[in-house]
Amino acid sequence: MSQRLDAQMAFLMEADKLKQVLRATTLADGTRAENSGEHSWHIALFALVLGADAPADVSVERVIKMLLLHDIVEIDAGDTPIFADHDASAQAAKEAAAATRLFGLLPPDQAASFRALWDEFEAAQTPDARFAKSLDRFQPPNQNLAAGGGSWVSYETRYETFEARVGTKIKRGAPWLWDWLQPKAEAWFAARGKL
């Protein structure tokens, strides 16, 4: 039991480093950049609250687990802002290596279980993963709207880029959330001549 707990605590202490990874999205009040630990907690809370309206084939408990784990790889791989230009295949390779290292700190049963959830989230092929991905894309624009534009301003984002990189993911797993968000975002971009 001592070795198991040692491994679990090693993982948990390593996971604390996620609080040091800064994201492009600011807090809703715009005062500072959000960190990836805060983001993971916040979207898990989104799942708890908004999951009541998820499709019947979605397990909110599994979605919450995915969301708590989904960005842990950023400890090694860093955050990739959605509106930044980057090499997606190189980033995916860095994240896969990070997943191997980080989940490998856990006892074998938990390592396999957590890695499977992370892989499922990344593939976004199951109802749970599609809903989780939707929430991962839904939270930041709401914070951008609250903060007066946030990362949209920083990256000089246009509406068509926002719709392509964010809207398609939200629509795929939570179309009712896109229906609610889309007119608000479109109005923000229209007011700034970014349509």
Image (cartoon, rainbow, N blue to C red):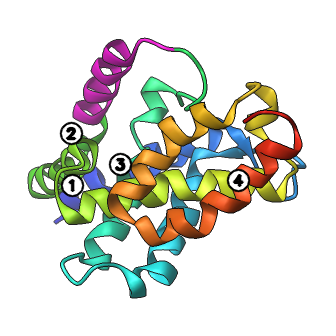
Secondary structure beneath disc 3?
Answer: helix
**Which corner quadrant of the image does residue 68 belong to?**
bottom left
Going by the numbered disc 2, the residue's amino acid type is Gly
**Range shown magenta:** 86-101
- Lower sequence index among marks 3 and 1: 3
Which residue is tagged 3?
11
Q: Nearer the viewer, mark 4 or mark 2?
A: 4
Secondary structure beneath disc 2?
Answer: loop
Q: Is residue 109 left or right of residue 119?
A: left
Asked whether the beta carbons under mark 3 and mark 1 sit within 8 Å of each other, the answer is no
Q: Residue 117 carries which label?
A: 1
**Residue 134 in picture, x, y percent from top left:** 42, 57
Going by the numbered disc 1, the residue's amino acid type is Leu
Residue drawn at the location 17% of the way across and 49% of the way down:
111
Alpha-carbon span between mark 4 and mark 2: 40 Å
Task: Mark 2: give few (<14), some (14-19) or many (20+) Cα within 10 Å.
Answer: some
